[in-house]
Structures are given as C-alpha cells and as structure tokens.
Image (spheres, grey):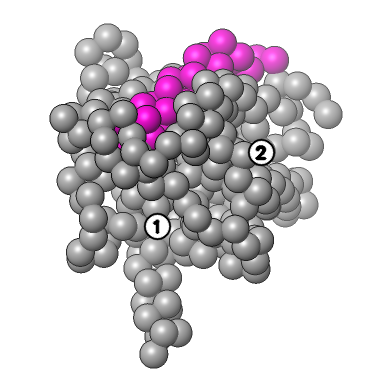
C-alpha cells in the first residue's frame, strides 16, 4: 500500500511541477531575474504549495506514526551552520545558471532534451563527489 | 522593477503549487516521509538504505508524470538558456550544494517551510538570494 501511495504522490508532484511552470528553465530564470522583466509566477507556486501543506505538516509534527502506520521521519537537525548556508548558496548559484532544480530535472528527463540529461548526470556526479569528500573527512 | 505581464501565469502557478503541496502532504501523511527530491535522489545513490522502494517509486512517479500529462495535453515548452558548459557547472553545483545544504526547493522550500523549520527558512532565503544574484550577474553584468 505504501508503495502505491509513494508512486501516486510522485505522479501528482510531477504533474504539479509541469502545470506550475517550474519545468521550464526559461520561466524559472524569468522569476530569478528581478532586474529584468520579472515573472512572479514561481512565488505563487511556493505560496500555493505552502498554503496547502501547512496543515498536513503541522499534523505530521505532532504524530509519531503516519496514517499508514509508517514511522514519521522528519529532519531532526537544528543547527544553522556554515554547511547549511554555504551548500544552499552553491545550490542557488547552480539554480540561477541553468534554471533547473532537482524536482523539475526529473520531471523533464523524459521530455527529449539533451540538456536535461547532461544536467542530471552532472547533478548525480556532484552528489557522488559530496559522498566521496564526506568519506575522506570521516577517515 | 517591471512585471513581465506577458509571461505571468498566476492561475497555473497557484494550481501547480497546490498540486505540489498536496503531493508533499500525501507523502508525509501516508508514508511519513519528506518529499525532498535531492535527498531522495542522494539516498538512492547509496548502496544500502531504508525504504528504497518507496523512495524510488516516488521519483518514478515524477519521472513518468509527463507521460500521463501527454494523454490529455501537449507538454509545456521547455526552453533552455545555457550551453553545455553552463549545464555541467550548474548540475555539479546543484548536486554538491543540495547535499551540503541538506535539501533543495522541495525539501526546504516546500516541506521545510510548511513545518516552520528555521533551518529550511534560512536555506530557502540563501538559495533564493544566490539565484537572484547569479541571474543578475549573468544577465545584467556579464550578458549586457
């Protein structure tokens, strides 16, 4: 059952990305371009998503088990450290260059554009690089 | 600041956002998991781990969503503004950055802000500011 709900939630998430305009890099950059002709659409995507998710996540914070009796796995870290801020800044630079973030990259992957394939390979490479650096740090 | 009224799509953006929020809500209410795409992708790169099939199926849903969409409508335009070097650099930065920062637009921006996590609010401000600054530099300082 949980596998089915995972897949259904993923499908819905992907449809939302396509409908919202997030799966068009030019539109994402239109939102990030405050000094040019600014397209505020993506602010409304965030507002719509957060307004919808606020009550369900408030419920989730108060419960140990999900409705399908899975453990509620919410992040526990609290520190506002350099890794969080530095990592997010790096992510933002990459997002600004290409106009692509991880969710839309997956939603666009079967769209037949080589650009997405290259971006996803580089992104997975970046994640593997991070894992390798973390392993070295741990040694 | 000038608003780009021609490309502004408020209703589609709001409706798409509601779907994204509903999907993230279903995932946490039913599966107890955060719909953070960078985190899900990274955990699938690890060899072992809990809940692999659920994570994989969520990502598979996103991957296949365009096929479902195409049964009813033509896919929205996907326009790219960077060449291969830009895409390569951007992909690497997004990969490394989302791991150090523990999340991306979905995990921090949607799920994290919805659970009022201070870490996610800080991360979202950081990647938004970096995104605005990067486009400003590329388009208005270097691009002309």
Overall secondary structure of the magenta section = helix
Q: Secondary structure at mark 1?
A: helix
Q: Nearer the viewer, residue B109 or A62?
A: A62
Task: Name which quarter of the figure residue A122 lies in.
Answer: bottom left
Looking at the image, is mark 1 or mark 2 earlier in the sequence?
Answer: 2
What residue sits right under mark 2 in the picture?
A32
What residue sits right under mark 1 in the picture?
A123
Farthest residue to the bottom: give it: A139
- Of all chains, the one bearing label 1 is A
Q: Is residue A82 magenta?
A: no
Q: Indicate whether A15 appears above or below A86.
A: above
Q: Position of residue B24 (x, y in %)?
A: 41, 31
Q: Which residues are magenta?
A: B5-31
Q: Is residue B47 left or right of residue A62?
A: left
Disc 1 versus disc 2: distance between alpha carbons? 20 Å
Q: Residue at x 31, y 57 (%)?
A: B43
Q: Secondary structure at mark 2?
A: helix
**Quadrant location of the N terminus of chain B in the rendered image:** top right
Q: Is residue B16 magenta?
A: yes
Q: Position of residue A38 (x, y in %)?
A: 72, 28
Label 2: few (<14), some (14–19) or many (≥20) C-alpha neighbours in 10 Å: many
């Amino acid at each position: 059952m949980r596998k089915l709900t995972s897949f259904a939630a993923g499908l819905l998430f992907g449809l939302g990305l396509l409908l919202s305009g997030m799966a068009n890099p030019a539109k994402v950059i239109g939102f990030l371009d405050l000094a040019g002709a600014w397209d505020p659409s993506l602010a409304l995507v965030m507002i719509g998503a957060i307004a919808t998710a606020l009550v369900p996540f408030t419920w989730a914070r108060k419960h140990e088990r999900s409705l399908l009796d899975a453990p509620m796995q919410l992040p526990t870290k609290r520190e506002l450290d350099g890794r969080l801020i530095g990592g997010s800044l790096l992510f933002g630079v990459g997002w600004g260059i290409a106009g692509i973030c991880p969710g839309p990259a997956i939603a666009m992957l079967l769209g037949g554009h080589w650009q997405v394939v290259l971006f996803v390979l580089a992104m997975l490479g970046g994640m593997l690089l991070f894992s390798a650096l973390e392993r070295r740090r741990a040694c | 600041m000038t608003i780009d009224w021609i490309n502004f799509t408020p209703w589609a953006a709001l409706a798409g956002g509601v779907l994204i929020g509903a999907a993230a809500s279903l995932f946490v209410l039913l599966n107890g998991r955060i719909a953070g795409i960078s985190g899900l992708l990274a955990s699938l790169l690890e060899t072992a781990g809990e809940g692999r099939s659920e994570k994989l199926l969520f990502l598979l849903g996103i991957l296949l969503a365009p096929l479902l969409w195409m049964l009813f409508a033509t896919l929205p335009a996907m326009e790219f503004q960077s060449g291969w070097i830009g895409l390569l650099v951007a992909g690497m930065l997004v990969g490394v950055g989302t791991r150090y920062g523990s999340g991306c637009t979905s995990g921090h921006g949607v799920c994290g802000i919805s659970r009022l996590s201070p870490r996610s609010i800080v991360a979202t401000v950081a990647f938004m500011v970096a995104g605005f600054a990067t486009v400003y530099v590329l388009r208005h300082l270097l691009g002309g």
